[in-house]
């Protein structure tokens, strides 16, 4: 009974995590590519955005999107706000990780790509990013796990995910220890495959 | 008025910050010529090559490939880079792709050649550099000499009008130098236009049509391989060759 209610919450936890993971990855890649583009306007914009996102609490960003944006005429559902908020916040960390990976690639690789006549985008797609992925993966995996856990912040803007359900359930049944232990275990059940997957990907990438 | 392939440098100047590395380089390289550029480290030899295919910008003067000005910021740079290939001293193969993939990368993803054709030609090139059995190997599994031969095949796969060699044997163990030089020599004999920055004086003597001796960012002396190596006129050329031939 307790468990079935909590498992219901897991569904939303997974949706929030996957949604914000995809969003933060795409956005982080955009910030990182802007940062290494060499165009001063793009570089400066990227630096400011990333620093702003890194320098403010995720909770405040979430509140801002859910409670302040409606005042400007942008109304989002709690789930949408959670995905966009977490995705935005985490895009900064993703960007820093991606940038580090891109910048770690030997200059000779860039020169070889250029000397073959590759455009910037072909070089990124065919030469730089495939190599950077190996460097990026371990940190990316950890970011995924952190995002899974931080998806619990969505409970603060009424998304009925696992932490939210756990809180309600504990308060209404007074079975704090049972409920919270179950909640912790359920988070572990979700993060364990991620931990394993990252290990597998790392091993596979090393073979290249 | 279609002229034969040629590379022209006119009064080229280049600064790295305050460091004036090229101080008015002028040279012409014509179709089929093998030109060796010699000189001590830091003399600007490699920078000359890098200005020809736009890996480096230049601050003054004019560099033209087949009459097209080399400018890193115009789309024509792609034409120039597919016309003039480059071989690097650190090979710069793509470590995440195998030998054949390295070779077809440019033809397929820059020149939009059909994959089967590119692979067919890639295998022919591997045969030419004596590495047919290494097609599936990754760069990390090859010796330096093998890697450089793959790099040469990669350059050839672009079907360039000229190839620039930037100290192609300087990162190799001495016993591996010969296999790379012999591939280059064959290329020269087949009429490939080549500009070679090198310290291999025997190679220059046997293969070069012309030698440029560079010092302090200037062409100090220019002439046939025989003349420069056997009868250098300029004092600095004499000193350089003396140091090179009798290092101890």
Image (cartoon, grey):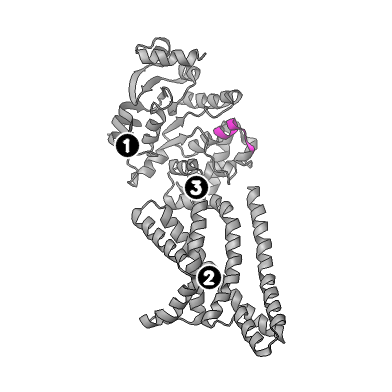
Could you tell me how far apart the alpha carbons at marks 1 and 3 are, in whole angstroms?
Answer: 30 Å
Separation of disc 3 and disc 2 at Cα? 36 Å
Label 1 belongs to which residue?
B58
Asked if labels 1 and 2 touch by Cβ distance under 8 angstroms, the answer is no
Q: Main secondary structure of the magenta part?
A: helix
Whether residues under marks 1 and 3 lie with C-beta atoms below 8 angstroms apart, the answer is no
Depth check: B121 or B103 in front?
B103
Residue A37's x, y, as percent? 40, 53
Task: Give the magenta range.
Answer: B141-148
Task: From the top left corner, tell me how far across and down residue A148 is, in percent.
Answer: 60, 70
Relative to B199, B12 lies left or right: left
Q: Is residue B42 visible?
A: yes
**Label drawn at residue A20:** 2
Q: Quadrant of residue B103?
A: top right
Which of pointers 3 and 2 indicates the residue nearer the eye? 2
Q: Mark 1 or 3 closer to N-term?
A: 1
> Residue B42: where, in percent of width, then height?
41, 27
A66 or A60: nearer the viewer: A60
Q: Chain of mark 2?
A: A
Image position of B98 with respect to A183: above or below: above
Label 3 element class:
helix
Q: Determine whether A75 is above or below A205 in the image.
A: below
Quarter of the image for the N terminus of chain B: give it: top left
Q: Which mark is residue A110?
A: none
């Amino acid at each position: 009974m307790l468990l079935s209610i909590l498992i219901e919450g897991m569904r939303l936890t997974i949706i929030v995590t996957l949604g914000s993971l995809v969003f933060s990855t795409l956005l982080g890649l955009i910030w990182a590519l802007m940062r290494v583009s060499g165009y001063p306007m793009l570089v400066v914009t990227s630096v400011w955005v990333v620093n702003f996102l890194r320098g403010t609490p995720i909770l405040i960003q979430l509140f801002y999107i859910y409670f302040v944006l409606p005042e400007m005429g942008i109304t989002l559902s709690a789930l949408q706000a959670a995905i966009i908020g977490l995705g935005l916040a985490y895009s900064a960390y993703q960007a820093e990780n991606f940038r580090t990976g891109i910048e770690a690639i030997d200059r000779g690789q860039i020169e070889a790509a250029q000397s073959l006549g590759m455009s910037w985008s072909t070089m990124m797609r065919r030469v730089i990013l495939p190599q950077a992925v190996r460097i990026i993966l371990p940190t990316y995996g950890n970011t995924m796990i952190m995002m899974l856990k931080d998806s619990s912040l969505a409970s603060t803007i009424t998304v009925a995910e696992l932490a939210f359900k756990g809180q309600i359930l504990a308060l209404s049944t007074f079975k704090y220890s049972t409920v919270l232990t179950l909640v912790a275990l359920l988070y572990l059940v979700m993060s364990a495959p991620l931990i394993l997957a990252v290990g597998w990907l790392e091993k596979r990438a090393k073979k290249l | 008025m279609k002229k034969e392939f040629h590379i022209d440098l006119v009064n080229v100047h280049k600064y790295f910050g305050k460091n004036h590395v090229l101080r008015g380089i002028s040279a012409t390289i014509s179709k089929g010529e093998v030109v060796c550029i010699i000189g001590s480290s830091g003399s600007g030899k490699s920078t000359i090559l890098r200005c020809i295919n736009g890996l480096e910008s230049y601050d003054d003067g004019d560099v033209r490939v087949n009459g097209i000005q080399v400018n890193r910021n115009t789309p024509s740079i792609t034409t120039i880079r597919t016309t003039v290939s480059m071989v690097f001293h650190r090979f710069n193969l793509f470590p995440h792709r195998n030998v054949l993939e390295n070779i077809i990368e440019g033809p397929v993803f820059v020149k939009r050649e059909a994959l089967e054709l590119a692979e067919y030609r890639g295998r022919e090139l591997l045969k030419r550099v004596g590495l047919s059995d290494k097609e599936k190997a990754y760069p990390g599994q090859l010796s330096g000499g093998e890697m450089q031969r793959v790099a040469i095949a990669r350059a050839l796969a672009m079907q360039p009008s000229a190839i620039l060699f930037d100290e192609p044997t300087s990162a190799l163990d001495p016993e591996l130098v010969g296999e790379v030089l012999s591939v280059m020599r064959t290329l020269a004999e087949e009429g490939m236009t080549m500009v070679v920055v090198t310290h291999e004086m025997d190679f220059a003597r046997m293969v070069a049509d012309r030698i440029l001796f560079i010092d302090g960012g200037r062409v100090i002396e220019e002439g046939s391989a025989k003349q420069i190596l056997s009868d250098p006129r300029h004092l600095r050329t004499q000193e350089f060759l003396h140091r090179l031939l009798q290092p101890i």
